[in-house]
Image: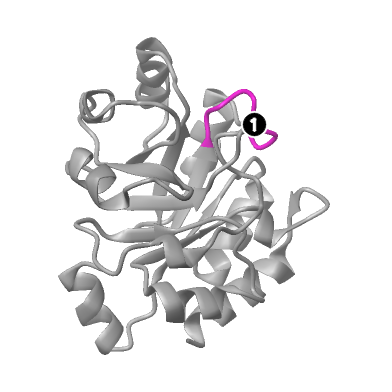
Amino acid sequence: MTRIDAICSRAGIAPRIKMCGFTRAEDVDAAVAVGADALGFVFYPQSPRHVTTEVAARLVRRLPPFVLAVGLFVNAKEREIEAVLASVPLNLLQFHGDETPEDCARWQCPWIRAARVRPGLDLIRYAEAFSGARALLLDSFSKTAYGGSGKSFDWALIPPALPLPIILSGGLDAENVGEAIQRVRPAAVDVSSGVEAKGIKDAARMVAFVRAVRAV
């Protein structure tokens, strides 16, 4: 937990909410209506939540002021990221693959770095290596995917003090996000499958998730 995280925790300030994996206008509107602080758009073709540059550009322009648009990339080529940035007004980049600190920092845009948490991963050294990031997004480790597994990880693996703010991800939903916040005290929480029904974003689950976060 960073010093700012600790201050917010003592002040009873609820973490920010990022919802990820939007592909439809009605889902974007629903997430904004329930109070999401940031919406994520996945530019990774292997993901079931992948969105094209053209569709993402239309969806992002639906966002009102102060709701951030986050672009998620996994080992994307430079020209691919350039094409997205030329068309989609993103506020923040999220790197979820094997990118180096230099890969992440080359763009004139704030960025966050995902870490797939597993035993043996030194999160303090990882955060120090990616010190230019605005935050460290902690997700579940999978041998077959770079995220989006819908499974949680052992929160006890998170050190008590990291040099970057924490965005907690990985299998969160309305049922467990309250406990997750109490135990980890992250700056933000990130949800995708936890606000879906049969693979589609669900407005009722979005409402339940936001209420659970605000209730802590």
Q: Answer few, some or many: residues within 10 Å of disc 1's Cα (few below 14, many 20 plus, some between 14 and 19).
A: few
Q: Is residue 37 visible?
A: no
Q: Residue at x 50, y 57 (%)?
A: 169
Q: Would residue 70 be found to the left or right of residue 148 on screen?
A: left
Does the magenta portion include 90? no
Q: Is residue 121 left or right of residue 46?
A: left
Q: Which residue corresponds to the image point at 60% horizontal and 40% vertical from the top-left? A: 142
Residue type, numbered disc 1: Thr
Task: State the scheme by which the image is colored.
Answer: one colour
* Residue 114 in the image: above or below residue 146: below
- Secondary structure predominantly adopted by residues drawn in magenta: loop
Quadrant assignment for the N terminus? bottom left
Picture coordinates of residue 152 (x, y %)? 60, 59
Q: Residue at x 67, y 60 (%)?
A: 194
Read off the residue under disc 1: 144
As helix, strand or loop, the secondary structure at mark 1 comes to: loop
Question: Is there any visible trace of residue 47 in the rendered image?
Answer: yes
What percent of the width, then of the height, locates residue 91? 32, 43
Q: Nearer the viewer, residue 167 or 119?
A: 119
Looking at the image, the residue that sits furthest to the right is 198
The residue stretch that appears in magenta: 42-49
Depicted 41 relative to depicted 83: above or below: below
* Horizontal and vertical percent position of residue 14: 39, 79
Measured along the vertical axis of the image, is residue 46 above or below residue 19?
A: above
- Work out whether residue 187 or residue 152 is closer to the camera in this orientation and state it: 152
Left or right of 134 on screen, residue 16: right
